[in-house]
Amino acid sequence: MEAQILLNGLLLGGVYGIAALGLGLVWGVMSVVNVAHGDLLIIFAYMTWVMVSVQSLPPFVALVLLIPVGFLLGMGLYQLVVRHLIRRSEVELMSLVLFFGIAAIIYGISAYFFGSDFRSLPIPLPTLRVAGLAIPGTRLAAFLIGAGLVLGLLWFFRKTYWGKAIRAVAQSRNAARALGIDPDRVSAVSFGIALAYAGVAGALIALVSPLSPTLGVAYAGRSFAVVVLGGLGNPLGTLVAGIVLGLAESLSTLWISFSLSPAVAFVLLFLVLIMRPQGLFKPLRSR
Amino acid sequence: MKTAEETPLLTQKRDQDRARTVNLVLVAAGVGAAVIFALQPQLPGASLVFWFNLMKAIVLALSLNLITGYTGYIDFGHVVFYGLGTYVAGITIGMLGVAVPVPLWVFVGPLLVAAIAVGVGLPALRLRGAYFAIAMLSFNAATRLIILNLPRDFAGGAFGIPTPEIYDPHTAYYGMVGLLVAVAVFTVWLGNSRFGVGLKSIRDDEVAASVMGVRTTRYKLAAFAVSAYVAGAAGSIEYWFVAFTSNELVFANVLTVEMVAGVFLGGAGTTVGPILGASGLYLIRDTLWVRFPYLYLPMFGVVLVVVVLWMPRGIVGFVEDRVPWLRAKLK
């Protein structure tokens, strides 16, 4: 029983990790705190639902399609809105208010189109049984995709030109500019990557849980808990923190009611913020 | 009003200008509003609920303004204190059946909400910027879930706390008038007081303020407690007005969005700003809501985006910057 609970938590953790990654990346690179991240995840999850249920696409095709959609949406959002914000003083505080507004817009859109009913997708993969444990195939695939893409970003940051440019801009916009890197373009690309990851995360969320527009707050809380625990934009830390949160949530069901489990993220976030606001892992900008 | 020597040099000029504008407009608007609000239930054709909710929107915006506008701590979970206010009154009166006089209790009970704010604020106000905002967002979400899961005969669970025996909207209406006047007067006083100047110095530069001898922790906690008390009292009076409270309604993030939009649209850290912002949004919402129930929330979002990008100091700042002749006339 306990082993099964631990396994469930671990599998969920991969999804939480990739869900939080985009939030931490944008925060780490340009000090913009995307409070709308949870609602973005949910709107991507709804896009998946529409593609699979209405257009009858295979779920993993929908997932792949959301990568360019998220990337373009991110670039567009950066060019339209964030670019104007980033030149001001107090970027972080004003971005909070700005994205709080964007969150309200996105929430209004998903509430308008999808109402308050829960919607869910048919489970595409069968459940495996190994050594007395039930391993839901879909959740396993979601974990592998999530964890794989998060670790892929580690390679991207270390080995590619754009990855190194993003790290440079995270450390200092001015120094990066002096070295011939255009911080504006790099930020736009980072925003694109962040939302591409959010797109994949949204598809995975649609596959592993029923959807409702109000879930945005729960996923915002989870993402912030993971980002604060795992260090802003640190892929490895984010994955570990996601797994920690997944384990904490599923272990908590041993003692408290299932309906309270989203509160675990909030309590964890509150405690981490107060006891160790610098998180457990180094942020992107410090390397 | 205190003399200029008592205010720090940095913000002195701008704040004096602003204080004069604010006071003039306030006196005129305050007299008019007081007459309307006091007479309202006798006026034909106007709805009690409309005016009550307008006052509630203004009170909540002024409450958030104390911590977010003056002190610079953006609070994304402020609705929690409003919700706790409804539950403090609801649990004592509705569930435990304590025989307290309701008109008194809606002002005394929220002291408990202020105490909770001190308890949360002690650790949370050590956090800065985004971290504080998010800690409060999570505090609200966790509080809502915890109250939902408390024993049903104590906090009503998902069913809420209906209390038809206290239903008395006409008296509750005057409770809200009283609260609105009290918080408006407090905010005007704050604008020129030592306490208010201390809070603004924390907003402008917390480290500098503490080096200059402002007891930052104490000031922040006091502002947070007053702010929570006001939101809690608004909640208690709301519970009295509708004789009901429910988890789904009173901890809704929508309410925080309204407060934040009202404060920033009007102008954070002023008195008239939040009043203007909250009333404007309320009037628009009230007309839109009937015809397009889904439109009003995105509209608040658009307001926030526009305000941050084009008028970061809100309507008050916008008027001060763009219409100098008006400011000169008002002096």
Image: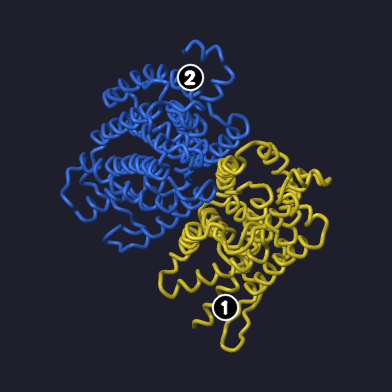
Residue underneath mark 1: A7
Residue nearer the viewer, B240 or B265: B265
Badge 2 element: helix
Q: Quadrant of residue B183?
A: top left
Q: Residue at x 53, y 37 (%)?
A: B300
Q: Distance between the residues labelled 1 and 2?
A: 63 Å
Report the colour scheme.
by chain
| Chain drawn in yellow | A
Q: Which residue is drawn at 80% across and 54% down?
A: A162
Total labels drawn: 2
Where residue A249 appears, as percent x and y from the top left, is 50, 69
| Chain drawn in blue | B
Where residue A184 appears, as percent x and y from the top left, is 76, 43
Where residue B159 appears, as percent x and y from the top left, is 34, 56
Residue underneath mark 2: B17
Q: In which quarter of the image is residue B139?
A: bottom left
Circle 1 Cα neighbour tier, 10 Å, few/some/many (<14 / 14–19 / ≥20) = some
- Name the amino acid, label 1: Leu
**Above-or-below relation of A284 to B36:** below
Q: Residue at x 43, y 58 (%)?
A: B142
